[in-house]
Every structure is written in C-alpha cells, then in structure tokens.
Image (spheres, rainbow, N blue to C red):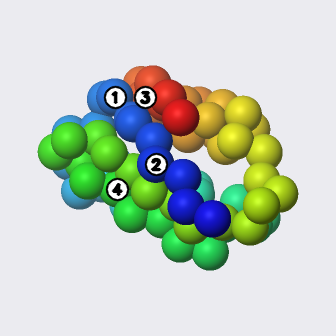
Amino acid sequence: MKTTFQVKGTHCPSCKALIEDICKDTPGVTACTIDFKTGKGVIEHSAKIDLDALKKEIESAGSYKVSF
C-alpha cells in the first residue's frame, strides 16, 4: 500500500532525512520519501500499520504537524 501525507514545518534536507528515518524504522514501512520544500510525503507499507503512532513519532521529533 501507499499512503500520501503532509508534514508542515519541514525546511531543510535534515528534516527530510529525519522524517524518512523515523518512517523507515516503523514496523511495516518498506519505503518513505519526503519533499522538504512542499512537505509532501509518501510511505509504502503493509496493510497493518499504526498511522496514529507514526504521526505522533514524527511530531515528537520537532515542530512538525502531520496530516494523513
């Protein structure tokens, strides 16, 4: 499955790398790409993934606001 989401508060390549690492470390996520300029993200994942937990993890890493 693919899920597209929006992350507000990204402004540099470090933001991109941090969020991609968080997503890739999440069980069930096989790939993640973030465009830090637009804040658009896409994750590839298995059907069973806790999007609420992923949202909380990303938001706790900085001043980010995630919407799926």
Residue tagged by mark 4?
A: 34
Q: Secondary structure at mark 1?
A: strand
* Disc 1 from disc 4: Cα separation: 11 Å
Is 31 on the left or on the right of 10, as rendered? right
Is residue 43 in sight in this rendering?
A: yes
Earlier residue among tags 1 and 4: 1
Q: Quick one: label 3, few (<14), some, or many (20+) residues within 10 Å?
A: some
Q: Earlier in the sequence, mark 3 or mark 2?
A: 2
Q: Amino acid at mark 2?
A: Thr
Q: How many marks?
A: 4
Checking the image for residue 64, the label placed there is 3
Image disc number at residue 4: 2
Q: Residues within 10 Å of mark 1 (few under 14, many from 20)?
A: some
| Identity of the residue furthest to the bottom in this view | 30
Task: Kindly identify which numbered label has been placed on residue 8.
Answer: 1
Q: Place residue 16 in its image quadrant.
A: bottom left
Compared with 45, 60 (above or below) is above
The reply to whether discs 3 and 1 touch (Cβ–Cβ < 8 Å) is yes
| Contact check, label 4 and label 2, Cβ < 8 Å | no
Q: Is residue 42 above or below residue 8?
A: below
Q: Amino acid at mark 1?
A: Lys
The residue sitting at 62% across, 74% down in the picture is: 30
Residue type at mark 3 is Tyr
At x 45%, y 25%, the residue is 65
Foreground: disc 4 or disc 3: 4
